[in-house]
Every structure is written in C-alpha cells, then in structure tokens.
Amino acid sequence: MIYLENVFKKYDDVVAVDNVNLKISEGELVVLQGKSGSGKSSILALIAGLSKPTDGRIVVDGENIAMLPDHFASLYRRENIGFVFQRYNLVPSISVAHNIMMPLIPLNLPQDLLKDKLQKSMKLFNITHKENVMVKKLSGGEQQRVAIARANVNNPKIILADEPTANLDYKLSLEFIEVLKTLKKQKKTIVIATHDPLFFNLDAVDRVICVADGKILPCS
Amino acid sequence: MKFINLYLFEYALEYLLRYKGKNIFIFILLSLMIAFMASVFFVSHAIESELNLGVKGMADITLQKKVAGMYAPSDASMMDKLLEINGVVGVESRVWGYYRFEPQKLNLIIVGLDSFAQQYNLALQNIANTFDINDSSMVISPQLKKNFKAAYYKDYFHFIKPDGNIKKMDIAGVFKGFIPLEANTMVVMSQTSAREILGLQPNEITTFFLSVGNAKEIPNIALHLATFYPDFSILTKQDITNKYASIINYKSGVFVAFMGVMLLTFFMIVYDKASGLSSEEKREIGILKALGWTIEDVLRAKFYEGGIVALSAYFVGIVLALFYVYFLNAPFIVNIFVEDTTVRHFISLPYSMDYMTLFLLFLLSVPIYIGAILIPSWRVATQDADEVMR
C-alpha cells in the first residue's frame, strides 16, 4: 500500500533520507526505530506529502505522491493521512473541539455530519469531557489524545505518529499503546517513528524497521 | 461544495479574537482613516453641490457701482438704459448691504424686498410669498435666530440707523430652503426698512441683475458694460463661481485629504509589512497545511479575516463620517475648506451623498488591507508544510 523506492531527501547539504526502499502493507503497524536525527521523521514527512523527496518514488495506493503539486498533496493528506506530531502541533488558545475539527473545516460538511464526526472522534479517544476547554489548559496526556482524535477525525487510512510518547510518562505511554490497538482494530495502516523501547516488543506491532543516518539497516 | 464556507469564516473570526490586541488596533486605525477620508470627501462634495446650486439661481450678470473702490448706491433710472443693451432680456434691482452686529462678530446681510415685484431669486420669491413682511418686521435664517437669541434678542432686534436713532424690527419668521452659505447671516425685510437702516434714498438701489437671452453672449455683454460703465463692478455667473471657489477652497481641501489618505495608507502597509507574520502564525499555517488545508483554503480564511476587519472598519468609518459631517457639522475640516472666518461659523452642510466617492474610499481601504493580509500568508502557505513547522 505504501511503497518507497530509492528515496533520497536532502536539506541543503545534509542527507536526511538516503536511498530508502520500504514497503508497508495495508493494516500493518510498523515502527521506525532510530535515534534523534536518524531520518525517521523525514520518512514520515515524505509519506505524508509534507515534503518532497529529492529523488525517488513514493507510491501510496498505486499513486506516486512524490511530486504532487501542492494543491493535490494537500488533498492527498486530507483524504489519506492522520498525523500525530511529536509536539502535537495543536493550537493552544482554542478549544479541544475546535482543534479536532480543523481537518474538517475545508470540507464544508453539513453541520450534523461535522458534529457527528467530531463527537465520535472525541468519544473514541475519551476527551469528550474536555470539549470546550482550551488546549493550553490540558495535561500532556490529554493534549496527545486531542492530537490523535484530530488525526483520526476524518477517518484516514494511514496514521503517522512522530515520537508519540516523547513527552509522556510511562503510564500515559501505556495509554497511548491502548489507543494504537484501537486504531489497529479499525484496520488503519500505522507508522510510528520512535526511539522509545516500549514499542519494540509489542504484540500489536507487526514490524520494527531500524533507521540510521537516513538509511534502513538491519536491526541489531 | 458551497462557495461560502461558514466554518472557515468562524475560524477566521476566532483567529481575529486570538490576536485581538493587534486587530483592535488595526480596526481603530483603519476606521479613523476611513472616517477622515470620508469626512473630507463629504464636506468637499457638500460644498461643491452647494456652490453649484447657488450659482444656478444667480443672475447672468450682476452690476454694482463703486466709488473709490467701495460699493455705492446707483440711481434706479439706470435700469432703462441697461434694458436697451442688445442681448439683455431683463433687469432686476436689489437693495442690500452689510450691517455689523458686533456682539456676535457678524456681518449681517440686509436684503430689501419689494413684495409686489417679481424676485430675481426663487428662494426670495418663496419668502415673499410665505411671510407677511411690513416696515417693522423681518425674516431671518435659523442660524441668525440662534445668534440673536444668544444676544438676548428673542422676538425683535434693534438696528442703529445712520442718523444714530434706533429702528426696532420684529422677527416675523425664520426662512428655510435657502443656500446656507449665502443665507446664514441674511435678514430679509421690506425695501423701505432696508433703505432706512442702510441710509439709502428712495431712488437708490445697490445692485442690478441682468438676464441675458443667449448664455454665449454673456462675456460680450460684460465687456460692453465694462467699457461703458467703468465705475461699476461687473460680475458674471462664472466670476461669482470663481469668487466662491476662492472663499471655500475645496481644491486645497481635497489635496489635504489625499495627503492624509496617502500617509495613513502608507502607515498601515508599513505596519503590516514590518510586523509580518509571527513564528506562531507561520507555524499555524504549516499545521493547517499538514492537516490537509490547501493554499486556497488558507488564503480564503485569511481573506475572511482581512475582510471582517476591513469591511467592518469601512462601515464604522462611514457612519462616523456621516455623524461628524452632518450631525457635528464637521468642525476642523470646515476650517481647512473655508478660509473666510465669518462664513465658516454659519455653514450648515446639506446632505449630499456621492456614491462614486464611497466606492473610491472602498477601493482605497478594503482591498489594500486584505492584500496586506494575503501576501505574507500566501508566501508561507506556498512553502512545504514540513519546512514551515520546523
């Protein structure tokens, strides 16, 4: 379903992704393991269409998204991708509900449908009770649940999470793993970039891929 | 998809509220700028229409005798000679003069009315038809009524005649529908009373008004009169227009307005350019792009954002200007337009709306502001979302 072929990504003189070849099947939960700066976040950004590869092909559902014009890259993200960012990238001074509904705004859905999607997503990630609270007043765990609810609100096929437990304590990290299991049950394709060992031996995880210096290497 | 996305509109409104300090400052500045520009345009347009209206009711040629540069009375028998001039189709006379009312620092214009004769001016004709003016009563303007009242003359006024005696004149009424610039200090009374107060003999009149059959002949007849009557001041309609234009210098007013417009618009743009987008604002655009917003969605939200501020400022500015000009009578701005201080205090601006001016103001403010919002947002939105968020 997701296929990266000879993908390179350079930022000025720095090679962030170096000839990566990767295949991820539909419904698979894959962990990209690597240290900070290894290139795993760059791989996620490329799959999400947030940046364009310097070279190579990225095929999602049979379509090469590597060189999509900006407009179509946005439409691709809107329809296919739910992204949970490392620092959540929420808008702190607006409410939980407004943050979660952000991906739905451009769709201009009928109000009933929009509310229904919003409520379902908030309920699924147990954040309904904070609906009208400003995000900046939430705890780290709650903020993460908002970020996941936002990523899932439009029911995307692919969920990408970048260091999702980096700002969470052990208990909250376990809660996140439960969330992952919920998403996996929904047959989502999930790619997690992390260096948290908690993920490496999980039953729910189908594969662990090691990344170092922008390359995919065998895990030691 | 529906063209107007109310969720985007709501998002824009919410965004404005999040940065309310900055946006309220811009809103106030923009409103004041528009109010200032609109006020200047309203005043200049009102005065211009007023002048055009005044000139319309004037005689083609006005003659007044001058002695040593001062206006002097002429003999009424001269009317017959004037009628003999080729092209002149009618001659009217008028008895009038200035009377200084020191307590209120006013120069009253006393106009003597022969109620049996046809008046040279429609407004005077209305006064003659409406009020019963006898030798001890007069009709005054609403503004003068206030001035008299301020000097404790409620129902009458005491004129001092040239021989030092007092002539009591009752206020028979207040006229309306006259041209304010001309009429604010005007007192209309019988010709007999006017002659008595101004010290004129029964055969003396002050001004002749000539009607000319063919408007193209006016300059030639004026030249003819200047040759044969060198001791007379000869004013054509055009001369009077020019004279008024110099009293009410609307051209310089418009110039001042444009200066103001340019400076304030420049200030707005400089402010916006200097502040640009903060890192937080840029990051938010990056997040929106990452969540699947297209450049068009971002710009549409920004368009609503700019539109809400600019349009509301535009409407508030126009309402403020209407209030300032037509309710408060445009203090300060009138001072710039009208150089003559005696006239300045009595101007009541008639309502006059120029929709082209309103449209011009709209063009000078709303699109410029929306453009200043859209350009930096477009610059950010066209970058890779990943790069912007980093």
Image: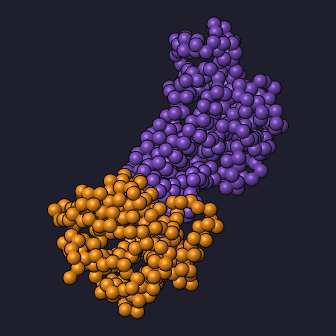
* Closest to the observer, A183 or B25: A183
Q: Colour of chain A?
A: orange
**Point 63% across, 12% down: residue:** B214
Quarter location, residue B382: bottom left
Among all residues in the image, which is located at the extreme left? A13
**Point 36% across, 53% down: residue:** A68
Q: How many marks?
A: 0
Among all residues in the image, which is located at the extreme right? B132
**Point 31% across, 84% down: residue:** A200
Q: Position of residue A110 (x, y in %)?
A: 62, 62
Among all residues in the image, which is located at the extreme bottom? A171
Q: Is residue B173 left or right of residue B97?
A: right
Q: Position of residue B137 (x, y in %)?
A: 78, 41
Taking the image as drawn, is residue B155 in sight?
yes
Taking the image as drawn, is residue B24 in sight?
no
Q: Position of residue A5 (x, y in %)?
A: 27, 60
Q: Is residue B248 left or right of residue B56?
A: left
Q: Quadrant of the C terminus of chain B?
A: bottom left
* Closest to the observer, A193 or B261: A193
* Closest to the observer, B40 or B216: B40
Task: Establish if A74 lies above or below A159.
Answer: above
Quarter location, residue B60: top right
**Point 21% across, 63% down: residue:** A19
Task: Establish if A169 lies above or below B263.
Answer: below
Q: Colour of chain B?
A: purple
What colouring method underlies this structural image? by chain
Q: Position of residue B26 (x, y in %)?
A: 45, 61
